């Protein structure tokens, strides 16, 4: 299966290099960030973070029209969630950014799309993302995490 258009949510240390390298490999990439300043910087062909050669890749991808940034997701073939998952109270992971990013793609996903959780998350979070999407999009079906699982896999 080929993914011609990928939406990367969160243009930080993980998301922006991922977006720029995918775009440099001929994938049409939409980078999404809630920070308008970040979106404007990327659309200006610059990186707002310091990583070796990242500016060069972002500049080239934007100049070729393969990377465009915006504050909200649009329809794509695959979605990469690379938003923060900081420790919250009692050192429990705060999944609120992941939930917000998940809900932002819910209106635009369609049958056959791929959703990748790139953020660092506790075990079970991918299932949680699928449940959030299933609740928001009852017209779609999502993989059942228990499908095919042996008791010792659980
Ligand atoms: N930085 C690393 O080396 C590294 C390595 C492995 C894993 N991770 C994990 O990857 C995830 C992202 O880390 P990072 O270092 O790239 O974070 P970061 O803070 O550099 O970037 C996160 C970006 O997400 C944006 N964002 C927040 N909510 C959003 C939303 N709803 N929609 C779109 N954008 C949103 C923020 O504005 C920010 O630009 C974390 O879970 C982190 O633990 C990071």
Image: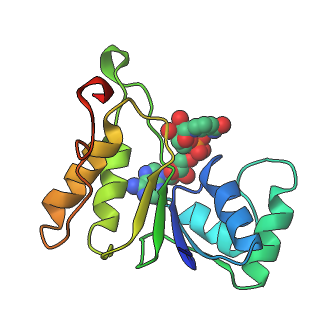
**Residue at (19% x, 70% y) in the render:** 140
Question: Is 34 positioned to the left or the right of 5 in the image?
Answer: left
Instruction: Examine the rendered structure and indicate whether residue 73 appears above or below residue 38.
Output: below
Instruction: Examine the rendered structure and indicate whether residue 69 appears above or below residue 87.
Output: below
Instruction: Examine the rendered structure and indicate whether residue 26 appears above or below residue 148.
Output: below
Question: Is 30 positioned to the left or the right of 112 in the image?
Answer: right
> Is residue 45 visible to us here?
no
**Residue at (66% x, 75% y) in the render:** 43
Residue 72 x/y as whole percent: 42, 71
**Residue at (32% x, 14% y) in the render:** 90
Residue 57 x/y as whole percent: 81, 66
Most distant residue in the top direction? 90
Residue 148 x/y as whole percent: 26, 44
Question: Is 88 positioned to the left or the right of 120 in the image?
Answer: left
Location of the C terminus (image quadrant): top left
Residue 99 x/y as whole percent: 30, 49
Quadrant housing residue 44: bottom right
Number of marks in the rendered image: 0
Instruction: Examine the rendered structure and indicate whether residue 141 appears above or below residue 68.
Output: above
**Residue at (31% x, 20% y) in the render:** 89
Question: Is 149 positioned to the left or the right of 27 in the image?
Answer: left
């Amino acid at each position: 299966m080929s993914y011609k258009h990928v939406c990367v949510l969160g243009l930080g240390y993980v998301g922006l290099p991922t977006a720029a390298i995918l775009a440099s490999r001929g994938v049409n990439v939409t980078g999404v960030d809630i920070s308008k300043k970040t979106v404007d910087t990327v659309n200006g062909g610059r990186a707002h973070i310091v990583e070796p050669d990242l500016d060069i890749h972002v500049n080239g991808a934007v100049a070729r029209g393969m990377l465009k940034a915006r504050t909200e997701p649009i329809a794509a073939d695959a979605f990469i969630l690379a938003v923060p998952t900081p420790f919250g109270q009692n050192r429990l992971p705060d999944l609120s950014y992941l939930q917000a990013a998940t809900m932002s793609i819910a209106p635009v996903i369609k049958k056959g799309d791929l959703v990748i959780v790139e953020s660092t998350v506790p075990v079970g979070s991918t299932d949680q993302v699928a449940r959030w999407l299933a609740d928001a999009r009852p017209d779609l079906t999502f993989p059942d995490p228990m499908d095919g699982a042996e008791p010792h896999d659980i």
